[in-house]
Image (tube, rainbow, N blue to C red):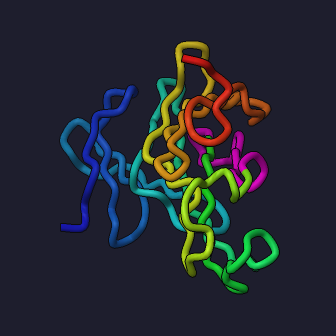
Amino acid sequence: GMGTNFDFQRSGYPSYMDRYNNWWVVLDSAMAPTETISHQGDGQTDDHEFLMLENGNFVVAANDAQTIDMSVIVEGGSTEANVTGYIIQEMDDDQLLFTEWRSWDHFEITDYDSNLTLEAIDYVHGNAFDIDYDGNFLLSSRSLNEITKINRITTETIWRFGGTQNQFEI
């Protein structure tokens, strides 16, 4: 079917991704839909992760594909590459944007340690995000082989673990 990622939220309510309509659906205790949530702005709502917080806020993500001339970034790069970035948005219970983090503002395309000459490059590919014990975001990015800690208010990077921009020694 078109429903995926059924999960119980911190709020106690279940949710799932409606891939046909490209939005998250929140259910009540009788499993009836009560609300639909999608990201705001460009891109496509990501189906990997969704959080409904205890305070009523929602956290959603979007994949944001842009056409980029990769030939100016890497030898042999496509002049019209479809490069996909990642966006995390937190909204209040009225679905008004509270904060937004965009990979384009914090990660370089060259942080992706793979073939940058392809026609399509998913340079972040956020697989999961959550809120750490201190209230900040943790993002797992498959394409970057990285866990990133992000300040939930300022959206600044706190640290990067793994990948080409690793800040830790093990």
Q: How far across and how far down the image is residue 62, in percent? A: 55, 58
What span is in magenta? 91-107
Give the residue displayed 28% in from the left and 49% down from the top: 5
| Extreme residue toward the front, this view | 75
Give the residue displayed 62% in from the left and 46% down from the top: 89
Classify residue 44 as left or right of residue 101: left
Give the residue displayed 79% in from the left and 32% down from the top: 154
| Extreme residue toward the bottom, this view | 79
Relative to the observer, which residue lies in front, 123 or 102? 123
Q: How far across and how far down the image is residue 142, in percent? A: 46, 48
Q: Is residue 57 visible?
A: no
Relative to the observer, which residue lies in front, 95 or 103? 103
The correct choice, above or below, for 121 with respect to 123 in the image is below
Quadrant where the N terminus sits is: bottom left
The correct choice, above or below, for 49 with respect to 56 in the image is below
Q: How far across and how far down the image is residue 119, in percent? A: 57, 81
Relative to the observer, which residue lies in front, 28 or 69? 69
Q: Quadrant of residue 86?
A: bottom right
Relative to the observer, which residue lies in front, 4 or 120? 120
Q: Quadrant of residue 99?
A: top right
